[in-house]
Image (spheres, rainbow, N blue to C red):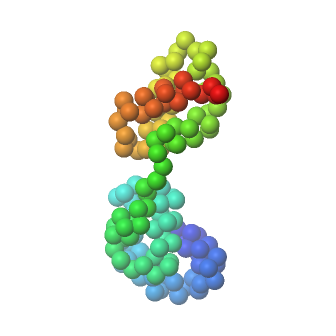
Amino acid sequence: MYEVILGNCRKKGLDFLKVLKENFRDIYLAKVLDFSAKKDMSMGELKALLFEIIDGDQRDPEVIYREKHIGEKVISLEQLVAEVLQANESKADEYKASTQKAGLVKYFSGQLQRQLKGRESDEKVAAEVQKALEQWKVA
């Protein structure tokens, strides 16, 4: 975590020790770490939170997280499906000729649910995956 803070300080031309002393007081730093552990934050989310604090935001980490919408990816399910299919192009290509279509839909649905952290229903995700696979490379 200190590497992230140091790297961002260097990038912005800030004094690392001064930022630590002024922006990350001992108790506040512990609060940030505790909050990030409770939220099971990704490294990207933690970095976004740390960057806000480096920039001088001294509010409660939970308030910063909520108000800055850290962790919320503003992307439609349709766009996310397209990204997952593109990242697994060979598997998506198998769909048309496959006799195991349900297995491939389940595979891609699982990939998506991991990224979505279960925020969408399995039925909705599977329906979107199936629709995208039916249209895959049909142009």
Closer to the camera, 71 or 31?
A: 71
Dividing the picture into quadrants, the one containing residue 116 is: top left
Dividing the picture into quadrants, the one containing residue 120 is: top left
Residue 128 in the image: state x and y as whole percent: 45, 32
Closer to the camera, 76 or 3?
A: 76
Residue 129 in the image: state x and y as whole percent: 48, 30
Residue 94 drawn above or below residue 34 = above
Image quadrant in which the C terminus is located: top right
Which residue is rendered at x = 50% and y = 78% of the image? 54
Which residue is rendered at x = 58% and y = 21% of the image? 95
Residue 136 in the image: state x and y as whole percent: 60, 28
Residue at the front extreme, as displayed: 139
Is there any visible trace of residue 33 in the rendered image? no
Is 9 displayed left or right of 130 in the figure?
right
Residue 98 drawn above or below residue 83 = above
Residue 50 in the image: state x and y as whole percent: 48, 71
Is 14 displayed left or right of 46 in the figure?
right
